[in-house]
Amino acid sequence: MEMVVEVISVGRATEVATGKFIYQVQFGHVIEVGEEMRKTIPQPAGTVAIKETASIVLSMFMNFPGAVPYKVGSKWVISLSDQGDLTMNAVKE
């Protein structure tokens, strides 16, 4: 299986076993919120209706020795083999 996704968010997290910082990287798609979908999303009175939302495909916790190589908005090809091997390659634009 292969899918092109976008980095939706990158945030710091704490690894429970060591107390050290790690990173949570979320991959997915930004999707437009149409009228039908808007009916299912609670909306506080007096707020502007949302126009798009994130659909998360994969959320991973990772440890990087330096800068995080995944930038928000960058696109990646995620491949999952029949044996369960996961690979990610940057989309060349």
Image (spheres, rainbow, N blue to C red):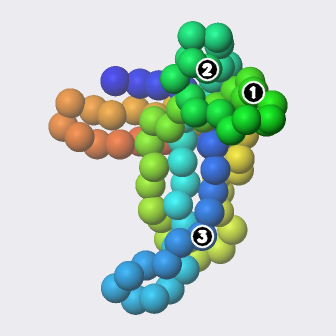
Residue at position x 35%, y 42% from top?
86
The label on residue 38 is 2
Give the residue drawn at x 27%, y 32%: 81
**Residue 70 in view of the camera:** yes
Determine whether 86 is above or below 41 in the image.
below
Are the residues flagged by discs 3 and 2 in contact, CB closer than 8 Å? no
Dot 2: few (<14), some (14–19), or many (≥20) neighbours within 10 Å? some
Q: Is residue 6 left or right of residue 27?
A: right
Q: Which residue is mark 1?
A: 49
Location of mark 3 (residue): 12
Disc 1 marks which amino acid?
A: Ala
**31 vs 6, nearest the viewer:** 31
Q: Earlier in the sequence, mark 3 or mark 1?
A: 3
* Image x and y of residue 48, in percent: 81, 31
Under tag 2, what secondary structure?
A: helix
Q: CA distance from mark 3 to mark 1?
A: 29 Å
As measured in the structure, the alpha-carbon distance from the residue carrying label 2 to the one carrying label 1 is 8 Å
Q: Amino acid at mark 2?
A: Arg
Above or below, 87 against 60 in this view is: above
Please, what secondary structure does the residue beneath circle 1 have?
loop
Label 1 Cα crowd, 10 Å radius (few <14 / some 14-19 / many 20+): some
